[in-house]
Image (spheres, rainbow, N blue to C red):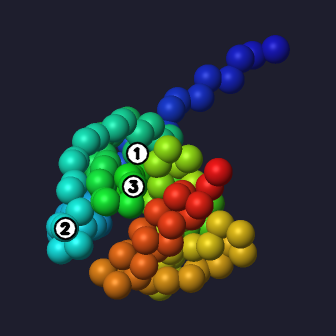
Amino acid sequence: MPSIITSPPRINEAERASWIAELESIVDQAEEWSRRQDWAVRRDSKAITEPMLGTYKVPVLLIHTPQGRLILDPIGRDIIGAEGRIDLCAMPSYDPVPLIKGDRGWEFWSPKSQSPVRSWNEADFVAIAQRLLQAENETP
């Protein structure tokens, strides 16, 4: 029986560059909005590997508030039913509220109902962050 040799998928350099630029923009906004709340922020990076984009580095934002810490953590571009996902997580539990990019742009989704609950804007970002921190502080 002949062996079938398959080549790896071609890396889409333009799409990867566009995706990284979009992530940079989201993190820039979150950083600015956090600073307006007098929350300390620190940028870090991590590597993500996806079949069509290869391995690439993305920004991660650590947010320190008087109530606790959050992380804005990119998950990936190749998401089923969406065009990207970033998680906003409370630490140390890492309970996320996913930020999903779909037809209507970036929206926060409810992990329980799997539906959009808020848009990507400063007021909703702050509200979601505060809700996550409150839930984190109520956890025994």
Query: Which quarter of the figure is the N terminus placed in?
Result: top right
Q: Residue at x 23, y 63 (%)?
A: 39
Q: Residue at x 38, y 60 (%)?
A: 67
Q: Amino acid at mark 3?
A: Gly
Q: Which of the 4 image quarters holds residue 31? A: bottom left
Seen from the viewer's position, the closer of residues 52 and 89 is 89
Pointers 2 and 1 in contact (CB under 8 A)? Answer: no
Examine the rendered structure and indicate whether residue 5 appears above or below residue 96: above
Q: Disc 3 to disc 1, how far (Cα)?
A: 34 Å
Return the x and y of residue 25 as percentages of the image width and height.
23, 66
Residue 51 appears in view:
yes
Q: Earlier in the sequence, mark 2 or mark 3?
A: 2
Badge 2: few (under 14), some or many (20 or more) residues near its Cα, within 10 Å?
few
What is the residue that sits farthest to the right in this orientation? Answer: 1
Seen from the viewer's position, the closer of residues 116 and 112 is 112
Mark 1, residue position: 53
Mark 2, residue position: 38
77 on left or right of 13: right
Return the x and y of residue 108 as percentages of the image width and height.
50, 74
Return the x and y of residue 68 as percentages of the image width and height.
39, 55
Return the x and y of residue 126 as percentages of the image width and height.
36, 76
Mark 3, residue position: 68
Seen from the viewer's position, the closer of residues 76 and 97 is 97
Secondary structure under tag 1 reads loop
